[in-house]
Image: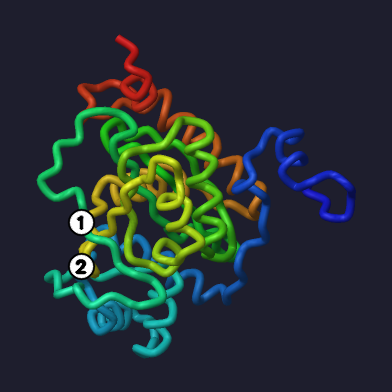
Amino acid sequence: MIDKGINISQCRQCELLRIHRSGLYYAPVPESEQNLHLMRLIDEQYYKTPFYGIRRITAWLRNLGHKVNRKRIKRLMELIGWQTIYRKRNTSKKDKQNPVYPYLLKDLVIDHPNQVWATDITYVPMRRGFMYLCAVIDVHTRFVVNWGISNTMTSTWCRQIVEEAIETYGQPEIINSDQGSQFSGFEYTSLMTEREKPIAISMDGKGRAIDNIFIERLWKSVKYECVYLNAFEDGVQLYEGLQKYFQFYNTERLHQSLDYKTPERVYKNVA
């Protein structure tokens, strides 16, 4: 739908098509049918046993009758972004190229919209491949302020999604992510640090997925309530399916933690 060969910018084409820039349609990443099946099993298992490592996942799959080795499972777990939860280690040593920012949410009282946003990337299985989904959620209200899909994980893509959210809803006081290279590189962090009023950057401790528990819960909802119930054929179907789901999630889905209100209602402070 987006034509790079015409004299209209991709940004303008997206405006005319009424889709955001980070929602461009991409082809799914190809994998063998067997690997896609294994990745789907591993992805679902993550929400049951996030503390499993490569050895246990390999043994679990072998017990199910799959002839796999650790090298293969390690590659597939890396593709879906499995982050085993384990006791937090010392993360004071920082990479000179991509510095690690401290985790700012411990004991923080989060009580109003745009105080803290959280962002992350997750793997999305499809019938003939897979893609990645990045979203930004307002932690206090669970309101999804932006999202996008891609077949690659880059800092440019993540920055674009956050930038669009800021343009639409204003900037948060803090934005939290994991320590992945997409979120620790200058291209992404400069969006926060070089503003007239800088946004504080918070990062999970390594191996501490629970630090970003709100967006982890979002991923579980997205997958069990949308992705796993549909066999999306291509990027267009996936985009349209997620667009409907996030509309439902923000405006119709009642949250027990929000006193059975919708995220949009709480975010916009509708009585």
Residue at 89% of width from left, 47% of height from top? 7
Q: Is residue 66 left or right of residue 22?
A: left
Residue at numbered disc 1: 210
Q: Residues within 10 Å of mark 1 (few under 14, many from 20)?
A: few
Classify 12 as above or below 124. Answer: above
* Horizontal and vertical percent position of residue 165: 49, 38
Q: Earlier in the sequence, mark 1 or mark 2?
A: 2
* Horizontal and vertical percent position of residue 209: 24, 60
Q: Nearer the viewer, residue 94 or 142?
A: 94
* Horizontal and vertical percent position of residue 4: 82, 54
Q: Residues within 10 Å of mark 2 (few under 14, many from 20)?
A: some
Q: Judge whether residue 173 can be spotted in this image.
A: yes
Q: Residue furthest top?
A: 271
Classify 76 as above or below 174. Answer: below
Residue at 53% of width from left, 64% of height from top? 154
Q: Give the residue type that dot 2 points to.
A: Ile
Residue at numbered disc 2: 85
Q: Which type of secondary structure does the marked residue at label 2 adopt?
A: loop
Q: Pointer 1 and pointer 2: residues touching (CB < 8 Å)?
A: yes
